[in-house]
Amino acid sequence: MNTVQNAQEKIKLIIEPVRGLNEELRTGLGKIEQTCAIISKNKLNESKQLIANTSGSKFAQFRSELNVAKQLAYEQNLQMQKKMESTRMRLSSSAYNCEDPKAAVTPVCRDYKVNNEIFGRVAESSAYYYAEAIGRMASYEKAYELESNGCTRAGFSTRLWSAEQEHLMPTLKNSVQLFGELLN
């Protein structure tokens, strides 16, 4: 059985790598966009032409991979919501026994209280995790747009995306299992 502290430590391992990451991405992209608005149109047109000539198939692959990742994030979120609902049903079926003050001190009720607290923490953390993942996908689309408009160097968005694939996608692919283990 998981303790609340043990569950919190496992949640931290899942959440910490993504905490605030999307906000930093959006802030950085906003600054690039502001700078781009100031740059002369001639410079932007030169950059656009260079990007168009050098990376058409890379962008097609990037867009395809990004769409697959977005779909994965939505599917994982949906699966987690279903898992949360089944856990909520399981927990609520044992809750009525713990309303009686005499039963509240029994091992079953203590387990219920611990499991209910873990459930709340997993619910909050998984909601945050999936919102961040879906938000990052939108940020990568924005990076692609800025690159397409000549605001960044060729390959900027694909380098950001490569970092996501290497460091964050493995956890996203297993996220339902990781969060789900805490609910058992």
Image: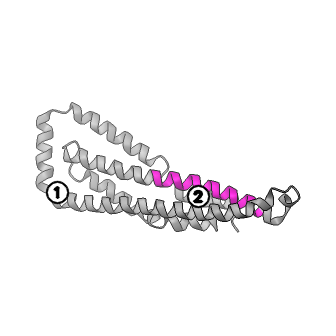
Residue ID at (48%, 67%): 174
Along the viewing direction, whichever of 90 and 30 lies nearer the viewer: 90
Label pair 2/1, CB-CB below 8 angstroms: no
Q: Quadrant of the N terminus?
A: bottom right
In the displayed structure image, the side of residue 94 where residue 141 appears, left or right: left
Residue ID at (80%, 59%): 98
Q: Quadrant of residue 108?
A: bottom right
Q: Which mark is residue 11?
A: 2
Q: Which mark is residue 43?
A: none
Q: Element type at marker 1?
A: loop
How far apart are the alpha carbons under marks 2 and 1? 39 Å
In the displayed structure image, the side of residue 147 where residue 104 appears, left or right: right
Is residue 50 shown above or below 110?
Answer: above
Residue 117 in the image: x percent, y percent? 69, 55
Q: Which mark is residue 55?
A: 1
Residue at the extreme top: 38
Q: Residues within 10 Å of mark 1 (few under 14, many from 20)?
A: some
Along the viewing direction, whichever of 131 and 38 lies nearer the viewer: 131
Q: Quadrant of residue 179?
A: bottom right
Q: Main secondary structure of the magenta part?
A: helix
Earlier residue among tags 2 and 1:
2
Residue 106 in the image: x percent, y percent? 84, 63
Residue at the extreme right: 102
User: In this figure, what is the number of numbered marks?
Assistant: 2
Q: What's the residue type where badge 1 is placed?
A: Ser
Residue 109 in the image: x percent, y percent? 79, 62
Q: Is residue 168 visible?
A: no
Q: Residues within 10 Å of mark 2 (few under 14, many from 20)?
A: many
In the displayed structure image, the side of residue 2 where residue 36 appears, left or right: left
Q: What's the residue type where badge 2 is placed?
A: Ile
Residue range of the region highlighted in magenta in the rendering:
111-131
